[in-house]
Image (cartoon, rainbow, N blue to C red):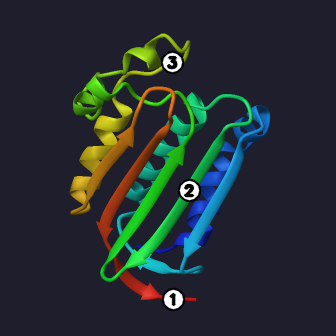
């Protein structure tokens, strides 16, 4: 389906607005270019972005920073979800996308989770022909980068 990314990301924001406001999270969003419409599987696309934003909001402290952006780069779309929350211990990054894996600091953070979210995100990204990477260290936040092929319908 055709998805207007500015509208899509606004919808994702709305999904988590209550929690964002509750925690006083500072949201920084960049749409490059604004009003970009692509053709993709909207269900998989929603699973990817909403899971990553949900995790960021869940593991961010009061007045934490959350950056959400997308950028069209040639024939690819790069989506970045970054936060300055609890981060992921470096020695555990290799297992992050494994089924049922939860980072040790996430387990002790009094949040619920099945350890399936990032596994499903990775499967969804791969179904779209893309890749996902993470850059993180404990107590330094996490930066997830998703790159998927972009079939551009319109810009602006």
**Mark 3: few, some, or many residues within 10 Å (few <14, many ≥20)?**
few
Few, some or many residues within 10 Å of mark 2 (<14, 14–19, 20+): many
Q: Secondary structure at mark 2?
A: strand
Q: How many marks?
A: 3
Vertical order, 1 against 128 (above or below): below
User: Whole-Å distance between the Cαs marked 3 and 1?
Assistant: 39 Å
In percent of width and height, residue 79 lies at 43, 61
Q: Which residue is label 1 attached to?
A: 155
Residue at mark 3 to residue at mark 2: CA–CA distance: 23 Å
Which element is circle 1 on?
Answer: loop
Say above or below: 61 vs 131.
above
Residue 84: name its quadrant: top right
Work out whether residue 55 or residue 142 is closer to the camera in this orientation and state it: 142
Image height check: is 104 above or below 54?
above
Residue located at (40% from left, 28% from top): 88
Q: From the viewer's side, name the closer residue of 43 and 139.
A: 139
- First in sequence, mark 2 or 1: give its number: 2
Which-is-in-front pick, marks 2 and 1?
2
Q: Quadrant of the C terminus?
A: bottom right
Lower position in the chain sequence, tag 3 or tag 2: 2
What label sits on residue 123 in the rendered view? none
The answer to which of marks 3 and 1 sits earlier in the sequence is 3
Residue shown at 37% from the left, 24% from the top: 89
Q: Residue at x 33, y 83 (%)?
A: 74
| Relative side of 26 to 83, left or right | right
Q: Which mark is residue 68?
A: 2
- Circles 3 and 2 in contact, beta carbons < 8 Å: no
Q: Looking at the rendering, which quadrant does residue 76 occupy?
A: bottom left
Q: Nearer the viewer, mark 3 or mark 2?
A: 2
* Residue corresponding to mark 3: 112
């Amino acid at each position: 389906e055709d998805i207007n990314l500015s509208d899509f990301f606004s919808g994702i924001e709305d999904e988590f607005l209550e929690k964002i406001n509750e925690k006083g999270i500072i949201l920084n969003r960049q749409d490059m270019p604004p009003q970009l419409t692509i053709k993709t599987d909207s269900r998989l696309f929603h699973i990817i972005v909403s899971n990553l934003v949900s995790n960021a909001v869940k593991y961010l402290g009061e007045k934490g920073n959350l950056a959400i952006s997308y950028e069209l780069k040639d024939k690819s779309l790069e989506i970045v979800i970054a936060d300055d929350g609890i981060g992921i211990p470096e020695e555990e990054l290799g297992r992050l996308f494994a089924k049922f894996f939860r980072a040790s600091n996430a387990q002790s953070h009094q949040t619920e989770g099945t350890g399936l979210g990032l596994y499903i995100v990775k499967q969804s990204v791969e179904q779209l022909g893309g890749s996902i990477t993470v850059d993180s260290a404990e107590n330094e936040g996490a930066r997830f980068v998703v790159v998927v092929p972009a079939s551009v319908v319109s810009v602006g």
